[in-house]
Image (cartoon, rainbow, N blue to C red):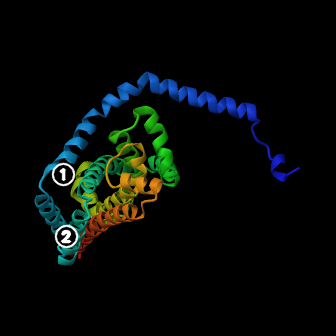
């Protein structure tokens, strides 16, 4: 007898019963509340569709000009701006513009959602050790869970489409935002906080005027990591109907279209590099500004 057979474990019948009970319970919940939950996400669907239409229907020179202005504002680097211009022109030249705009709109909405949800949770964690002890294991699970697993409950609840894909991407990409907000606020110098207390600052005033500004470089790193993880999840989300650069990659895998997969993969890499360089440079500029203020 193999040594593993001696290991105490649940018998097959009990295990089957437990799995069946959980599956049936989730199906019943989906049937009862699925439509109601879907209705809750209607504003999100409208916003995502509006962003996608705006980016696709706006003439490409205007879109490129706006992106380059944003990159320049963030980085103040000619090299980063020229790199972004080359990447965008190459994407257009190889006929991947529409898919890239769909992916960019998805990343934009995901980042807004992740920041809107992640920063308050990070602040909550920073203010309470007990909350941090509860949320940290949840974040650990979220970051180690295979990305495909997120699709199962989302699809069962909401079906196939953009919104389920968006939710799966947000769940996958939000942990760095929460962790780094928490870390940034906790790393604020205690002497600075004591000085704020001495001036009679309230808890909210300390957060708004001291903790968040000083934590901003770390929070920007969280934004950067969130964008990178969202881009990594885009191909997986294409399995449940998310349009963009992920779908041609999946098509290339299933049909062995080498060049299609490589070109769309490189377009994702190009977007990732542009976002990464811009957000990193912005974070460094903020950090330098803070050091000069308190130097």
Location of residue 269 by image quarter: bottom left
Q: Residue at x 26, y 55 (%)?
A: 104
Q: Position of residue 69 (x, y in %)?
A: 13, 65
Please name the residue that numbered disc 2 is placed on: 85
Please name the residue that numbered disc 1 is placed on: 55
Query: In the drawing, what numbered circle is on residue 268?
Result: none
Residue 169 seen in render: yes
Is 290 on the left-hand or right-hand side of 142? left
* Number of marks drawn: 2
In this rendering, is residue 47 above or below 132? above
Q: Position of residue 166 (x, y in %)?
A: 35, 45
Q: Position of residue 201 (x, y in %)?
A: 23, 53
- SS at badge 1: helix
Q: Upstream in the sequence, badge 2 or badge 1?
A: 1
Between 109 and 161, the residue placed more toward the observer is 161
Task: Name the outermost residue toward the top.
Answer: 32
């Amino acid at each position: 007898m193999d040594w593993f057979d001696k290991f105490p474990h649940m018998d097959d019948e009990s295990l089957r019963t437990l799995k069946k009970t959980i599956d049936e319970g989730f199906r019943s919940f989906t049937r009862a509340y699925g439509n109601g939950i879907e209705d809750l996400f209607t504003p999100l669907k409208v916003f995502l569709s509006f962003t996608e239409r705006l980016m696709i229907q706006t003439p490409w020179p205007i879109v490129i000009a706006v992106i380059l202005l944003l990159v320049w504002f963030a980085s103040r680097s000619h090299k980063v701006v020229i790199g972004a211009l080359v990447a965008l022109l190459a994407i257009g030249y190889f006929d991947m513009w529409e898919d890239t705009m769909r992916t960019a709109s998805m990343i934009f909405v995901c980042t807004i959602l992740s920041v809107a949800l992640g920063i308050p949770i990070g602040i909550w964690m920073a203010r309470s050790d007990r909350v941090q002890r509860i949320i940290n294991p949840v974040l650990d699970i979220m970051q180690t869970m295979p990305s495909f697993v997120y699709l199962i409950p989302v699809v069962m609840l909401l079906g196939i489409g953009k919104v389920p894909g968006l939710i799966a991407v947000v769940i996958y990409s939000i942990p760095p935002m929460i962790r780094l907000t928490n870390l940034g606020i906790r790393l604020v110098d205690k002497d600075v906080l004591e000085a704020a207390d001495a001036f009679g600052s309230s808890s909210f005033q300390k957060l708004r005027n001291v903790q968040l500004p000083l934590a901003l470089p770390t929070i920007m790193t969280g934004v950067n990591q969130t964008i990178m993880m969202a881009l990594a999840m885009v191909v997986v989300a294409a399995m449940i109907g998310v349009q963009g650069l992920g779908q041609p990659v999946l098509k290339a895998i299933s049909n062995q279209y080498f060049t299609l997969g490589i070109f769309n993969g490189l377009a994702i890499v190009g977007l990732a590099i542009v976002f990464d360089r811009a957000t990193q440079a912005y974070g460094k500029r903020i950090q330098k500004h803070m050091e000069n203020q308190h130097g």
